[in-house]
Amino acid sequence: SSGINAEWPLRPGKVLAVFLGLIAVSSAIKCFNGTQGDKNDLGKSIECNATKAYTQCHSPDNSKVVEFKEYGCGPCPDGTKGCKNCTGNECNAWTAKTVAYQCHEGDAKANCTSSSGMNCFSARSNYTGNDKALSSGGCGTCAEAKFNASICLDCEGDLCNGAGRMAVSFIAPLLAVAYWFS
């Protein structure tokens, strides 16, 4: 006798199929699934369907303001803009959306990024101090730059703190006074 039982119920082909099935089940990944809002809207990750053999997750790329807001299993839908693929368990975790924009900073344009909005600051028209950072203006809000609202003016939008805006903030009160005296 050779020691091999001819009646053994598991043939080599069946052993291989069971082994490959175990590998497929163990390679299922978890991805976050849902729609972008804030990080509390996304919920928990789910185990992706092993029969589809997902090896990727997808999520918004957050590089600019886009309409794509889905998180889920598998690669990005074909032709989708604003979506990115990633590989690995829970690789598509929520990240704050960032926006790239510019603000005037002195005579130059500063490149800014933010997850809270496109905000710039500048000195108020009646500012007579010598703080160069305030006089030059820049990215963010007055509060973020640690300037008091009595001497600093916030605005929202790309390049919103330019010379034209500062002139309007100076001229508007003058026009109001002129109207009052007329």
Image: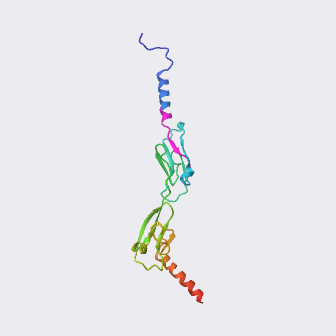
Answer whether residue 65 is magenta in the image: no
Image-quadrant location for residue 182: bottom right
Q: Residue at x 47, y 32 (%)?
A: 23
Q: Is residue 73 among what the camera can see?
A: no
Q: Position of residue 157 (x, y in %)?
A: 51, 68
Report whether 133 appears left or right of 174.
left
Near-viewer residue (180 or 109): 180
Q: Where is residue 72 in the image (x, y as percent from the top left)?
A: 54, 46
Q: Residue at x 50, y 27 (%)?
A: 18
Q: Residue at x 44, y 72 (%)?
A: 137
Q: What stretch is highlighted in magenta?
A: 23-35
Q: Position of residue 90 (x, y in %)?
A: 49, 45
Answer whether residue 34 is magenta in the image: yes
Q: Position of residue 118 (x, y in %)?
A: 50, 65
175 lies above or below 143: below
Near-viewer residue (167 or 80): 167
